[in-house]
Amino acid sequence: MQKVNYGKILDEKLAELKKSGLKPSLLLHACCAPCSSHTLMYLYDYFDITVYFCNPNIAPEKEYEFRKSELKRLISELSLNVNMIDEDYDSAPFYELAQGLENLPERGLRCQKCIAYRLRKTAELAVRINADYFTTTLTISPHKDCEFINKCGGGLSAEYGVPYLFSDFKKHDGYKHSIQLSAKYNLYRQNYCGCIYSKKQSSEVTGNA
Ligand code: SF4
């Protein structure tokens, strides 16, 4: 089966918005500053953006607070007119969804549930704040299942009645650009996805504790 080109779908949407002259509101779920850097710059001219930091998967708490503070710093240093809504640290929902899935490798069912949870929270908030669209920075990562993220977003869009902005932010060298921006703004680039299980897997690969 031919793969869906979500990058092309996004570019067609952006071209449509440019032609219309409209600038709708977008609730952008953000996992961290590096992934948000390219994504924010890519979407900024087309949307009135609110960034949403909701990541109960990130552990430990110090790491959560640091990733959040780096995201705030990035927005400030880019001098973008972007709002940010962030959740206080609460890892309980993540440990509940990860039960019995602790030892699965990345991209497995634990990750699908983790991503689906964060997207659902974003869809719920999009309804509450009347956002015209919602989406996530997560498709910029080469480690994430882009197809799953977009299908999940599309399903939640139908459930909540808010359009989901399909994406593949890796396109047009998006991931490479995020690395360049991270270097330019001296952003903290974590060496594990976020949860303690990915931290353990990463340290087993690298030998770092
Ligand atoms: S590896 Fe990443 S996506 Fe998977 S469960 Fe952990 S934090 Fe979530």
Image (tube, grey):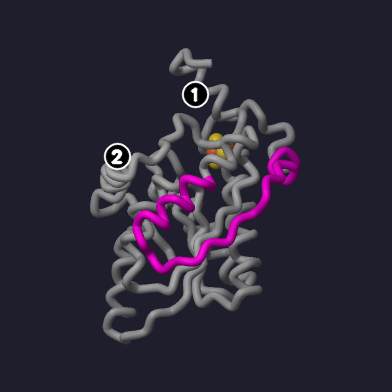
Look at 61% across and 74% down and name the residue there. Answer: 129
Q: Position of residue 154 (x, y in %)?
A: 52, 65
Q: Position of residue 49 (x, y in %)?
A: 45, 69
Q: Is residue 183 above or below residue 167?
A: above
Q: Is residue 26 visible?
A: yes
Find the residue positioned furthest to the left. Answer: 172
Do the residues bearing badges 2 and 1 touch, measured as CB atoms within 8 Å?
Answer: no
Per the image, the residue denoted by label 2 is 183
Image quarter for residue 17?
bottom left
Around disc 2, counting alpha carbons within 10 Å, would you say few (fewer than 14), some (14 to 19), or many (20 or more)? few
What's drawn in magenta, residue-wise? 68-96
User: Is disc 2 placed on a helix, strand or loop?
Assistant: helix
Per the image, the residue denoted by label 1 is 202
- From the viewer's perspective, is 185 left or right of 33? left
Give the amino acid at mark 1. Answer: Ser
Look at 62% across and 41% down and name the residue there. Answer: 57
Q: Is residue 197 above or below residue 8?
A: above
Around disc 1, counting alpha carbons within 10 Å, would you say few (fewer than 14), some (14 to 19), or many (20 or more)? some
Q: Nearer the viewer, residue 142 or 67?
A: 67
Look at 50% across and 66% down and name the residue there. Answer: 83
User: Is disc 1 placed on a helix, strand or loop?
Assistant: helix
Q: Quadrant of ligand 1?
A: top right
Q: Is residue 140 above or below residue 24?
A: above
